[in-house]
């Protein structure tokens, strides 16, 4: 099964590049199958990692940045891949 973990944080105004650099420097052990990092307006950073693991598996996640770098707690979501099929089918 493929599980995707999403991590999203919002930097203090003007510190988006610093948050992006911080997120990119965080290593996960073991490494995920795939990892992508995104940025968005309002100094937001999103990291998605893909794992070959059961949905409830304990997986390494990016930590919370220091309180001085972000405006709120990190948002985290977990998703499992579903087989492709007709629209509306799960």
Image: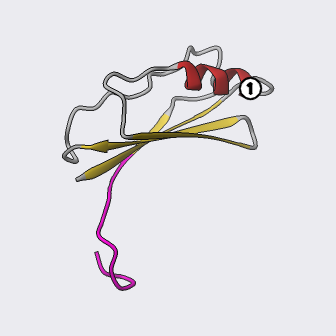
- State the residue in front, 47 or 77: 47
Q: Position of residue 62 (x, y in %)?
A: 44, 26
Residue at x 22% of width, y 32% of height: 58
Residue 16 falls inside the magenta stretch: no
Q: Quadrant of residue 38?
A: top right
Residue hosting label 1: 17
- Asked if residue 8 lies left or right of residue 19, the reply is left
Q: Position of residue 82 (x, y in %)?
A: 30, 65
Which residue in the rendered view is the most extreme toward the bottom? 86
Instruction: Label 1, secondary structure: give it.
Output: helix
- Asked if residue 67 lies left or right of residue 60, the reply is right
Which residue in the rendered view is the most extreme toward the right? 14
- Asked if residue 18 lies left or right of residue 79, the reply is right
Residue at x 50% of width, y 20% of height: 26
Q: How would you classify the magenta stretch by its main secondary structure?
A: loop
Q: Is residue 65 above or below residue 85?
A: above
Q: Is residue 90 above or below residue 6?
A: below
Magenta residues span: 78-90
Q: Position of residue 61 (x, y in %)?
A: 38, 29
């Amino acid at each position: 099964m493929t599980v995707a973990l999403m991590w999203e944080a919002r930097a203090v105004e003007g510190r988006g590049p610093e948050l992006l650099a911080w997120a990119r420097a965080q290593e996960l052990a073991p490494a995920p199958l795939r990892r992508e990092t995104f940025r968005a307006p309002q100094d937001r950073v999103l990291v998605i990692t893909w794992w070959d693991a059961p949905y409830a598996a304990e997986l390494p996640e990016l930590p919370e940045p220091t309180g001085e770098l972000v405006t709120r707690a990190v948002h985290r979501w977990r998703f499992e891949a579903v087989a492709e099929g007709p629209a509306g089918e799960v």
